[in-house]
Amino acid sequence: MALTHQGGSFEICTTPQTSVADAAAFQALTYVTVPGVVTAPSFRVVQNTLQENTLDSDIANIQGGFRQGETTDVVFSFAEESQAGIAAMEAAARSGNLFAVKYELNNSLGTNGTTYYALAFIGGGGGPTGGGGEDFAQRQYSITPSSQQPIEVAAA
């Protein structure tokens, strides 16, 4: 099965979240579709590794450090600024709260594919970008997952 982002959909829950426990909790939320995904988001949380050499031995003390989301950008191309998905992204970017986001890949040739869920901060927005009357209206948002590991649900 080939992996493709063509036909993928991005959605955001318009209600701020403090935590979402598991895939079932993410799936129970209500989402608004944001149209015209131009660049695919990547959901990763990285954990720093701390290493400290102590004076009493030559063995390094290694521990897991702070976990943080790796910021990714997603760009949307749209026809109307009043579109519900764009309005939801704008509101999320201005709020400073965590929001549940969902990105579904179309990687199984016509059926629903792998879905990624994350609890993330949304930044950016504004616009539309572009410089001329014949340019597509686009908005770019940064998505920074919280320290909670994003959840991947494989295609059925």
Image: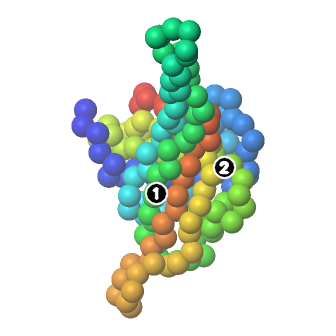
Task: For marks 1 and 2, give the CA distance.
Answer: 15 Å
Q: Which residue is situated farthest in the front direction here?
A: 55
> Which residue is at 56% across, 49% downward?
144
Q: Are marks 1 and 2 in contact (CB under 8 Å)?
A: no
Task: Give the percent coordinates (x, y) of residue 65.
Answer: 58, 28
Q: Nearer the viewer, residue 81 or 75?
A: 75
Q: Which residue is situated farthest in the left direction here?
A: 2
Q: How is the image coloured?
A: rainbow
Task: Give the percent coordinates (x, y) of residue 109.
Answer: 29, 41
Q: Secondary structure at mark 2?
A: strand
> Which residue is at 52% across, 32% downward?
48
| Residue pointed to by mark 2 | 99
Quadrant of the rendered structure where residue 42 is? top left
Q: Is residue 3 left or right of residue 20?
A: left
Q: Is residue 126 above or below residue 55?
A: below
Identify residue type, mark 1.
Asp
> Which residue is at 53% across, 22% downward?
52
Instruction: Say few, some or many: other residues with alpha carbon within 10 Å of mark 2 (under 14 / 14 to 19 / 20 or more).
Output: many
Q: Nearer the viewer, residue 22 or 107?
A: 22
**Can you tell which of label 1 and label 2 is closer to the viewer?**
1
Q: Is residue 82 above or below residue 22?
A: below
Task: Give the percent coordinates (x, y) of residue 28.
Answer: 67, 37
Task: Give the percent coordinates (x, y) of residue 23.
Answer: 60, 30
Q: Secondary structure at mark 1?
A: strand
User: Which mark is on residue 107?
Assistant: none
Instruction: Say few, some or many: other residues with alpha carbon within 10 Å of mark 1 (under 14 / 14 to 19 / 20 or more).
Output: some
User: Which mark is on residue 73?
Assistant: 1
Q: Is residue 128 above or below residue 64?
A: below
Identify residue type, mark 2.
Phe
Q: Can the viewer see residue 91 in this picture? A: no
Q: Is residue 39 left or right of residue 18?
A: left
